[in-house]
Structure formats: structure tokens, C-alpha cells
Image: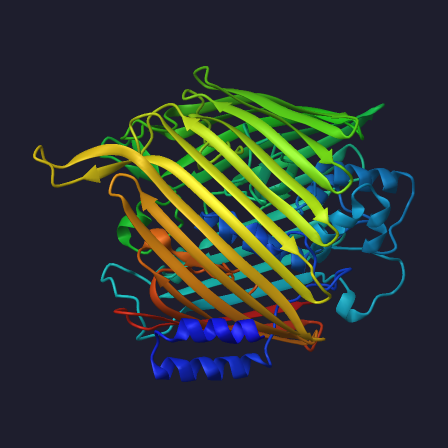
Amino acid sequence: MLLTVICHFLTLRRFTKGRTAALAFGLAVGGCSEALAQDPSPEKFSPGLSEEDLLEVIDDEIASENMAEMLSWLREHPVDLNSAWRDELLAIPGMRDEDADAILRAREKEVEFQSVVDLRQLPGGAELIERILPYVFVGSRRPVTPSKRIPLVVLTSRLSGFLPGTTRSSDPDILGAPVRSLSRLSVRFSDRLRAGVLFEKDSGERWNDGFVSGYVSFRGNGVLEQLILGDFNVDAGQGLVLWRAGDGWGGGTGGAIRRSGGRLLPYHMSDESGFLRGAAVVLKTRLSPLQVRCVLLLSRTPLAANVNDKGVVTSFYSSGLYRTDAELEKRGIVHEVLAGTRVEANLRGRGAIGVTFYRSSFGRVVQPGSGFGFSGERSQVVGTDASLVLGPARLFGEIAKSEGGGTGWIAGATMPVDTTGKLSIAWRDYSIAFNNPHARAYGLQSITTNERGVSIGWLMSLVPGVVLRGHADHCKIPGSTYTSILPRTSSDMMVEVTALPASGIRLGFALRMRRTEVMQAVTGLSTGPTRVQGTFDRNSARITGRLELAPHLESRIRIEHVESRSSVSSKTEKGTMLSQAFRYNTGRVECECGAAFFESESYNARLYDYEGNLHGAVQSPALSGRGSRWHILFCWGSFPWVRLAAKYAVSVVERSPIARELGVQAEFRF
């Protein structure tokens, strides 16, 4: 606590007396506040990946929100280890295909898990428990208490936004209220039949212009394994043919370079451009010793796009914001009709091989105005993927070919390092001609094309209680892109050490370095403005600490420094942040109170504070400028059928109006 007080004093010496008094009040209130703790883990703190660690490596706002929504969904709909299907297991972040196969093999031997701790009997089971504990449970024939019963109906409703008279300038073209709303209803008619519907309205949209999504899912017990009507996602192989948008389970950290494809899941998120709408069916059979699955897809999905006066699509619009008449004109202006299949043969414990194919057509000609990206009226991609177990190592890879002859491939291996660690390495080559709008393979770009590179990920225990994890990636972009007409290189490296020096204490240090080549404007030359290619670096270092002050009280501190530098302008911009939060949880009442103080010279040197939030909401607001941010979160769940939550946050930035945010959420379970 002495370190916390000293850091606060050093940070506050630039602030006014009023802010100092406010901090003292906030910390006093924080003494009776908390964290949204999950189910009790084998240890109070674990060196395994937390939700904050998963969000650290995601820079895209949509991907970050998808992550938060998926984690929230899994917390409210945990997976039963004794009855879950393979794709349900693989949907859990941190669950690898060898882990899922080990669980299924144990069940084939009529081994029923009595508790999640029984996973320790499996290879790597202790580490697996740390990764998946909040999202799984063990069903039992014994009666359970109401607080532990998996509900038949879950209704979640959330309202959030900036309070009137706060910071945001009004735009006369905005049609709706500055409130964001999300409502989600899921119904479990039985273990085999489920349904769900979602309604989401973004800030500035009218209520009747919100996004509506729904599905009905049926699980069979014979040849018919699954049937989904409505909105769904398909994940196949390593992502070169079909993969859901915005996936980012941990980037390359700790061996996540290799993906566990082969999942068909109903869609229950608010991203308006990351799903297929239609029907999907999974058929399965056993040809000893192989288990063969066949997925059949048929969809007609509405897409938003910018269209020129000739009716040609010049670009797709994926923000999901429809606040003005101009944005509403883009909505559903083109449809994609897609038919596809995936056949997968799984040899339990030894590997798998799969073939994926789809063909789609668009209602309009697609011709990007800049000449980059997918173009044409149809897309056709076929690929094959495989994984093979060779002793302690696992080899994996996928190769695909798109319309026009473009190819993309990725190949790699994961292997153990002594008995506690893992090393992963992968090579990739996505040609310029490889254009697939449904590909989301591993890489540093948001699209899977025009990239060659190598990635290494590692996870190992240095000594008991000290874990080293990280990743390094270097790639070359051989063709033109939006940011550079010349070939360029890009690299990313992160190293993190997590330690448990004593009971109830978790310390971490992380260093991340990113460099990319981009075209930048240069002014003041005799020939006039011109563009030259140079490097842009963004480096960050952070120290984190968690301390259990009392049985239900936890303190969290975060110190971070960021530097961004452009070689063209030789300008270095810096940012520094100190955040402190207190968390309290009795099981029925949870609350968190925290404050962050930051000074950033530009948005390039922005910082992120991973504060507690309403379930399913983004937990990492971007902070730039010079100021502070305060938040308090309160959750009440004294009854098993209802959980209420509210969050209030205030951002105070120099030369900017004060921003006040309020969010409320109700979750009903029956």
C-alpha cells in the first residue's frame, strides 16, 4: 500500500487541490469496493491468462467488443464438461483441440467428471483449469441449489450512454437518441433445443433502426448432430476459408498461433457484419477409427456497402452505425448468397484432416475504388487443413485457393518445453491474388491477403510461481496497401512475466514493441507536399499488481508508459498512466471503485485502462490528452433469478468538456 500512496502523490502533484480532494474521497470509498470475481479458482491468483490479458493484444475496437460479449455469454451459459459437444468445448477461450479430444476420450471411457478439478487427471489439466474455469461447470444427477442451477431462460437488457449536457457535440444529421441499448433473450427448451434473439441499438440510431438477430439450434443424437436456423458462424481449419469476423483469442501469446477450427455456433453477438444468415446442418458418422463430420451451409446475408451512381459497390461498410440518412442508405443494399460445405475426419488423439469449400455471389458488382481488396461478383474458395500428433509435438497447416488462382497457406508446429511450457512457430504466405472476404487467418493485418511472415509464441514456467509468456512476429507486405504503395515490413513483439511472490499477491511486467512502415506526408519542401515511406514505432511498458487486502477485498494497480515515434518527422510522442482500483465481492454484492490519471501527447500515444464493466461491454476505454477518469461499478445479485448492475464514469480532460457516462443492466434467469 505504501507504493500505491507514493505513486498517487507523484501523479497528483500536477493536479489541482480539488482533484486531490476528489481522489482522497474516491480512495476512501474504494476501501469498500470490488472486482467482478468469477467462480473460485484453485488459487486466489493464478499466473494463467485472465480476461484482461486476452484483451491486451486486441487493438481493434470491434474485436475487443466481440471478445467481451463472448466472455459474458459463456459466463451466463457455462459449458457442461459431461455433456458438451466438441464445438461447444472449442468455443471456450483457451480450449485447444487436444484438450477437447482428451475430455471426449475420458467420457468415451464412461468417466464422469465429479468437479472441474477432475481435469487435473488429463495431460496439462492443471493449466487447462486456470484457462477455462469461469466458463465451465460439471452437471450432476444430484439436485442442485437454485443459485447453481443452469437457467432455462436468460434475459439481459442494458442501457448506456453519455448523460445530457456532457461532452459530445451534437450533429444535426443524427436521427436518434444518444443511448446505446442491448437486449438478449435465450431460451433452453431442453438439452437439445435452444433459441435466442438479440436487439441492439447504437448511440444516435433510432429505435426502429436497431440490429435484430436470432437463431434456433437443435442437437441430435444420431447422424444428425446439429441444425441451426437463423444467424450462425462457421470456423474451419486455420481461418483461410471460413472464420468468424473479429476473432482474437489471445493473438500469438502462449501458443495460440494454432487455431482449433471445426466449429458451428449460433450467433449471439451485436457485431452487424460477422455472421451468416440462413441454415446450417452437421451430419456425423463413425468409420472406425475415424469420426467424420460434414457441415452443409446455405445463407443469404444482407450487407451494408457504399455504391456509386452506376450501382457498383466501391467498399463494404462494417461499422454497424446507422445514425444518419446517408448511413441508412448503405444498409442491406447488397446481399451475399453463400453455399458451402466442410468435411472433417478426426482420428482421436492422432490428428485430423478437413476440406472446406464455399461459393458465394453478390447482388451487385464489387469493385473497390482504390483497387485494393476483393472484387467481382462471386467468391469461390477451397482449402484443406490438417493436424498431426508426433509424440509430444503437434504439426498443423492449411492451404487454400481463391477465385482467380490466388493461394494462401499457413504451416506450423507446437511443442512442449520441459513439463511446464510450450513453444509455437508458424509460417504464412498469403499472395496478393488471394482474396477471400471470409478469411480471418493469423496475421498482423485485418485481412488475409498480401502478407508473408513468421510467428513464434512461447509460454513457460521459469520457477514455481513465475511464468514467462509472449510472442514475436515479423512479416512483409509485398504489394500496395491503403497506407503504402511500396512494399513494407511490420513486426510485433511482446514479453510478459507474471509472478506470485506470496499468497494473495500477483505481479506482472510486460513490454511490447511494434514497428510498421507507412507512407507519411512531408510538407515544407520546395516541390510542395509529398509522401515518403518511413517507420512508425509504438512501444509500451507496464507494471501491474494485485493484492488481496482482506477475504473479499482486492486492490489493483497499473502503471504504463507508451512512446510512439515517426522516422519521417523524427517526432516522439509519449504517454503515461497510473490507475488504481479496489474490488469487493461477497457473492451477492459486488462493487468496484477506481481512478486513472494520464498524460498523453497525442492519440498515437493513447493508453488503455482495463476497468471493470457491465457484462458484455468493452472494458478498455482509450485515454489521450491530460486528465483523469473515475468509475464506480455496483452489482447486486441477492436473488438467484435477478442480477442488477450499474456503472458511472467521469472523464476529465484538459480543454475538453467533462464526459459523464452511465450504464445500467438487468439480468433475469428463470
Which one is nearer the viewer's eye here, 325 or 389? 389
Return the residue found at the far left: 526
Image location of residue 134, percent across then percent down: 70, 57
Image location of residue 551, percent across then percent down: 72, 75
Question: Is residue 649 found left or right of 172 in the rendered image?
Answer: right
Residue, x 49% and y 80% (percent of image)?
Answer: 26
Name the image quarter holding the C terminus.
Answer: bottom right
Tally the marks: 0
Which one is nearer the viewer's eye here, 225 or 239? 239
Return the residue found at the far top: 405
Q: In this view, does 295 lie above or below 94?
A: above
Name the image quarter holding the N terminus.
Answer: bottom right
Instruction: Let me know if residue 612 appears in the view.
Output: no
Question: Is residue 630 found left or right of 32 in the rendered image?
Answer: left
Residue, x 51% and y 40% (percent of image)?
Answer: 493
Image location of residue 443, percent across then percent down: 50, 34
User: Residue 530: which quarter of the image?
Assistant: top left
User: Residue 586: which quarter of the image?
Assistant: bottom right
